[in-house]
Image: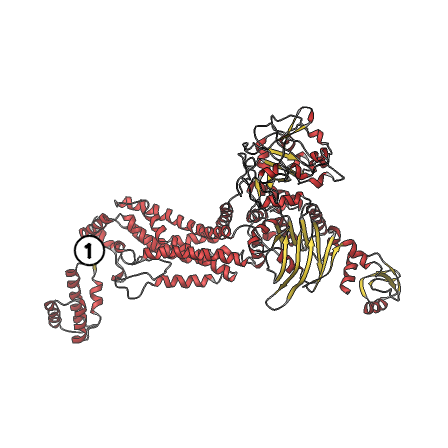
Amino acid sequence: MMSCPGLIRPKPEKGVFYMKAVLKRELKNYLKNPILWVGILIVFVGIYQSAGAYLKLHYIHSEEELEELEEPDVITDADILNGYVPSDRSQQMELGYQEIERLLESEEGFGYTKAQAEKIVSELRAKDMTIQEIDEYLEKEYCFYNATYIFEDFSQHKGMREEVNGYIEEKLKEHPFSWYFARKFADFCGLYTGFFSAVLLAFLYIRDTRRDTWELLHTKPITALSYVGGKVLGGLFAMLIVLGVMNLIFGGLCMARGVKAGFPVRIWDLPAASVKYIVPNILVIVCIYTIIAFLFRNPLPAVPFIFLYMLYSNMGAPGAASGYAGRAFAVMVRFPGNFFDAAEPPMAAGNQIFLLMLSAVLFALAVRIWKRRRV
Amino acid sequence: MSADVQGPLFVMLCGSFLPGKRDCRYYGDRFWSGCSHGYALHCVLCGYLLGRAPGEKMGDFFSVSYKKEGGGNFQKIGNPVGLPVCTVCAGVCGLLLAETGKSVRDFRGISVWTVLAGSGDIDSFMEQLVYDDGECVSEPVGRNGDCAGAVACGEFKSRAEVFGKMECVCLWFPKGVRSWRSVMDGGKSGSGGDCCSDTGGSFGCHEKKRIGGAAMSVVLKDLTVGFKNEVTAVDHVNLEIGKGIYGFLGENGAGKTTMMRVLATVLKPASGEVFLNGIRYREENYGKIRKKIGYLPQEVQLYPNLSVRECLEYMGELSEVPRPVLKKRIAYYLDKTNMTQQQNKKMRQLSGGMKRRVGLIQALLGKPEFLIIDEPTTGLDPEERIRIRNLLVDLGREQTILFSTHVVEDLAATCSSLAVMKKGKFLYAGSMGEMLDRAKGHVWECHVRNEADAAMLERNYHVAARQATERGMKVKIVSEAKPKADCRMAEVTLEDAYMYLMMG
């Protein structure tokens, strides 16, 4: 209808106003729900236990200090925090040969004499074989299995003070401390908030899907877009509260410890990593909850589904050439490996974009279902 | 009452010089107000003018502005098209006069804001105005002259409760009006067509209908509702419900709730048509329809963790009621249902009856034109039942209410018309009086000596009631013919009439 001179219809409130009303209601509900606060505590403890150790990283001032650093249970768990630095190839091979010699000599092992063991290792050195070739050779000639693992164990070694500090300095020239920590934070925060969202978001629709309330809601004039939008944003924002609190705490800790240790830090590294690696995951989980709640008129079937999805996402792709690679469509981005080597898994960015698109599709479907289920 | 004139802004009131024998209430919300800038006053109200110009119809005054001249006469102002929007024009009519018992002359020259708000504060009045566009939207008036024509009416119980329940009607384009000019000319002149299409903005069309005298109506045509298990819950039913309270009575499983769910847009009928004030129930219209209805289902638990107020605020927001209006409505209905004391209690702490009252309030928050309430008095104590019944009667003056209950007494106290359902069909649909008349001469009061005689009567007749007396037993029987026992014709109650109908 065109506007009329002299008499203009007052503008009605826009649908987005009512979407905001639903969103605010959901947020208030969550803020009053003790599970949110208990969950925040659990997530905090979980992240602190997993990633808190990285906050203790500092330059080593004395050899004694280096000695005092905690030794890992297994050498593969060793990181810069324990004073371990990556070995170059010659170091790795030399340390590997020494270990093979020790095993050949040892009574629990092969029981060769020292001379015999030295001879075998000399042969290996002379042939200048690759690790794989050494593995095959020892297995064939001496029934010595899995030599590869020995060399892998020595891919890093306990460094000297200068070596450790040099390595830290070198890495911090590439990126600030907060950049590395943000990846570890995103790794564990994504894991814990993912599982927590599977619990917390069950409350999003639990009341609305009761038969009587469901029916009543469907008689209300609020548009499907406003209602579903308000609900989805309500769930998302509730999880963003958790994420925000974690960012504040760990961002603050990272800044404080980084500055204290003399490391360069940036304030936006943690939030940026959260937005990139965690928010799309939460969004898609909210949308999955929404669509399952609307399909089954009950959000609870979403709980096992989300848990299974999380497990699938956590597994990582098998046989990935460069170590860890995330699963396709995963709702979790992991950053395994050492602190300074925590690279973004291949295709992670693409996967996150896919999750955003998937959320949009699920949201549109949910709106459609809500409309159709009205009558 | 202050007689201050608020500068150029004042209005005249309608009501006291109404034509014919209509009382002011009849024109309660049938106003028209047109405004333009540049004139001191441009508000025209119904009633008064009709009274002054008996030859003319209401439609002749559509959107015509009048200017007050000296001596209390009103001069017709021409076409305000093209003139800037005036700040606000408002008229008050109907119940204000009826309630205050004053004549329209008492209000002449008094600013409506002075009348309404006492303080004469225009801003506060503007904020309070609620527009019911008749189609769906209730919204606050825009502050910057968004709405030039506004009429406030409704139930102004007193100056102190001015905004307790107020309805303003903002009229735009009556049905069939093709242009603003034709509106200005009372629909007599040709089309100009620069403003509105002939479909006219839905609410203009609707308002015209209301102005024309057609009341809100619900029409069911050959309605059938079936379920997947091939049970037909409602079987080719026809019904027309007008303004007021319409009762639904019937045995369990008769199809009452199913029909109400259809009317509430929860269920889709298998066949047949349903119209709400001319709007057909179909997917593209559900949005409009839902803005007109309020629904209280048979069982509703709502949100146990929310307080009563929070719950109502949420439900009101889902009904798209603007916040400032919502707060006032919640306060009003909490008071009306005696729930003000409980407003901060959690829903889970409420008794069944209190929950029922909250359920009723949530249905009313959107100011529905059609209220569908399924057993609203279930679980209420007698005092609260009466309170709710009275509230429904009040609402029934303005709204169409469909009221289902098993408590016949509630129907008798509230409804003038009702339908009785059995196995998905109507046994009866019509006025209460006619239903009672049908049973007249078929209800008997018999006196028997003992239980054995009463039991014998029960074997042969439909016994509506048994009561032990000093002389033996008094048994009320519904029967076509006079029973053989010591019986005399009894006064028919609705319960008896219902029994008589159910006997077939």
Of residue B322 and residue B204, the one placed in the foreground of this image is: B204
Is residue B9 positioned above or below B287 on the image?
above
- Which residue does the numbered mark 1 point to in the structure image? A159
Is residue B16 visible in the rendered image? The answer is: no
Query: Residue A230's x, y, as percent?
Result: 48, 50
Helix, strand or loop for disc 1: loop
In the figure, is residue B283 to the left or right of A191? right
Q: Residue at x 33, y 56 (%)?
A: A350
Q: Position of residue B215 (x, y in %)?
A: 68, 47
Q: B2 or B446: which is nearer to us?
A: B2
Question: Of the residues shown, which amino acid type is indicated by label 1?
Answer: Gly
Say few, some or many: other residues with alpha carbon within 10 Å of mark 1 (under 14 / 14 to 19 / 20 or more): some
Residue B441 at x, y percent in the picture? 85, 59
Depth order, front residue of A125/A201: A201
Q: Most extreme residue toward the front, as rendered?
A: B190
Judge from the rendering whether residue A104 lies leftward or rightward of residue A266; answer left or right: left
Q: Is residue B271 visible?
A: yes
Label 1 is found on which chain of the structure? A
Spot occupied by residue B367 in the image (x, y as percentages of width and height): 62, 46
Q: What kind of colouring is applied to the model shown?
A: secondary structure
Give me the residue at 43% from left, 61% from top: A306
Q: Is residue B73 above or below residue A242?
A: above
Quadrant of the frame with the C terminus of chain B: bottom right
Q: Is residue B395 left or right of residue A247?
A: right
